[in-house]
Amino acid sequence: MSNALSDRADVFKWHAGQITPVAPSRFSWPQLKDDEVSPYFDGLNLRRQPTEIEKLINFKAIQDEFDAGEKELVTALLNLRDKLIGDAASALASMDSDQYHTLILEASASDKREIQNILEEIYERARKLVVSELEAQGATDLVAGGLTDAALDNLATLSGTTVSRLINDVQARASGAAARLAVTGTADTPTEEAIAAELTDASTAYVDAIAAGADHSAVSEGRSDEADDQSDIITSVYYSALLDDNTCEVCEQVDGETGATDDDVTPAPNPGCLGQDRCRCVLVYVFGSG
């Protein structure tokens, strides 16, 4: 990006944990009236008041994207889960109980492709969000980038990891369910229907967590790649833990961290987040007009 870390002292100063611009001639800062309620935060449960930088960022759009992406992935993963449960129940019903641990499940190529397609769409929407945020700060005539070869490779890996996590969970739960039924049931070998019913009726919270992790990673990659493409007009990167009023102490400690590029601040989602897949921290990109 165009400004070195040493330049930041000329641009920002800290006031009680907030960043305030001190060189307005270098920026285009849209101002809200004191009594104006920003639609950027409408309906959100924020952990604190937004800083001056954050007031320029449409956090509602970011949260809406998190929610939309998660919902799309949950739907696809639940459908895949049902298929895996059917396969698992069928296989386990024909096994001796001492062989349950050998269960191996696979996802079809089309199921894997569906997950990757969703992740690619999330990535592209995330890039467009960054463009919108920069334009809200005064940038003009920006066009969001698309899927690069590197992004496609990374998203394919993310898709594969996401599917593998689901398969591993279903395998473990299916083997455990069959073993419990074998011990407590009236038959030495549980029926396919009994195994499937036990798995289908169980909690799907683990599917939600897998979806959230994949979604937030795709959003992060899209935002980061777009910021890299727009690096000539971005003067700094700001770590924001504004979303969600139950932010963990790990993310809270780096809230407001600034740097010249993504490499100079803690990644978001935060790999150390106590909420793990649920982390909704984001990196905010600050536009400089010259």
Image (cartoon, grey):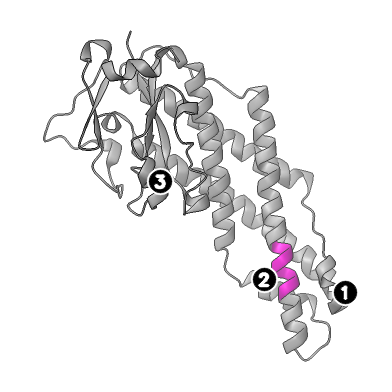
Q: Could you tell me if the residues under marks 3 and 1 are in contact, i.e. CB atoms within 8 Å?
A: no
Residue at the spot of label 3: 251
Measure the alpha-carbon separation of dots 3 and 1. Answer: 47 Å
Per the model, the C-alpha gap separating discs 1 and 2 is 17 Å
Tag nearer the camera, 2 or 3: 3
Q: Nearer the viewer, residue 46 or 35?
A: 46
Which residue is tagged 1? Answer: 95
Residue lying at the far front in this picture: please name it.
6
Q: Residues within 10 Å of mark 2 (few under 14, many from 20)?
A: many
Q: Position of residue 16 (x, y in %)?
A: 20, 37
Magenta residues, start to end: 170-176
List the residue tagged with mark 2: 199
The residue tagged with tag 3: helix, strand or loop? helix
**Circle 1 crowding by C-alpha within 10 Å: few under 14, some 14–19, many from 20:** some
Q: Amino acid at mark 3?
A: Cys
Q: What amino acid is labelled 1 in the image?
A: Met
Closer mark to the observer between disc 1 and disc 2: 1
